[in-house]
């Protein structure tokens, strides 16, 4: 019977943040999409996104965040600064929320 426990990490030729940037360059992704592509937990993606957002301030690129949307009343979380998915809608208290979507601007878009 195989041993149960944490899986060994996959071999990478790039850092996690480089991998996240690579996937964001290919197109918009949610934190869940990125976690599945890279092989880390969804909770671990957000700190990396925050760091990428800060480090891009010095470059000509920018992390674009399409805000989360409540699926019940269509409330848009446009003033939310945190990159995590909200737990409940402030208007209707529904917990069915479409998560924020992340993408990168290309240097020539600015």
Image (cartoon, rainbow, N blue to C red):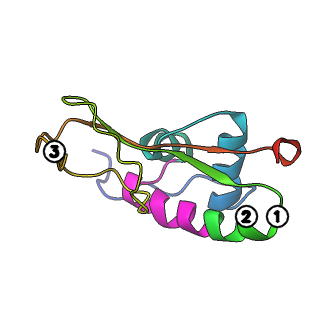
**Mark-to-mark CA distance, 3 and 2:** 33 Å
Asked if residue 55 lies in the magenta stretch, the reply is no
Q: Is residue 59 left or right of residue 83?
A: right
Asked whether the beta carbons under mark 1 and mark 2 sit within 8 Å of each other, the answer is yes
Mark 3, mark 2: which one is toward the viewer?
Answer: 3
Rate crowding at label 2 as few (under 14), some (14 to 19) or many (20 or more) other CA atoms within 10 Å: few
Mark 2 or mark 3, which is nearer the start of the sequence? 2
Compared with residue 56, is residue 104 higher up or lower down, i.e. above or below? above
The magenta stretch spans which residues? 39-51
Q: Secondary structure at mark 1?
A: loop
Labelled disc at residue 56: 2
Quadrant of residue 71 in the image? Answer: top left
Q: CA distance from mark 3 to mark 1?
A: 37 Å
Between 107 and 13, which is closer to the camera in this rendering? 107
Q: Splitting the image into 4 quarters, where does residue 12 fall?
A: bottom right
* Residue 104 position in % (x across, y down): 69, 46
The one nearer the camera, 1 or 36, is: 36
- The location of residue 5, given as percent across then percent down, is 31, 58
Question: How dense is the environment of label 3, judged by Cα within 10 Å: few (below 14), some, or many (20 and up)?
Answer: few
Label 3: which residue? 91
Total numbered labels placed on residues in the image: 3
For this rendering, which residue is in front, 51 or 3? 51
Reading the image, the residue beneath label 1 is 59
């Amino acid at each position: 019977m195989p041993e149960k426990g944490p899986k060994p990490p996959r071999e990478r030729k790039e850092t996690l943040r480089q991998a996240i940037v690579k996937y964001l360059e290919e197109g918009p992704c949610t934190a869940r999409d990125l976690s599945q592509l890279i092989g880390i937990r969804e909770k671990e993606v957000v700190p990396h996104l925050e760091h990428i957002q800060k480090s891009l301030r010095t470059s000509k690129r920018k992390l674009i965040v399409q805000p989360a949307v409540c699926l019940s009343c269509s409330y848009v979380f446009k003033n939310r600064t945190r990159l995590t998915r909200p737990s409940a809608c402030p208007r209707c208290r529904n917990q069915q929320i479409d998560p924020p979507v992340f993408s990168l601007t290309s240097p020539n878009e600015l």
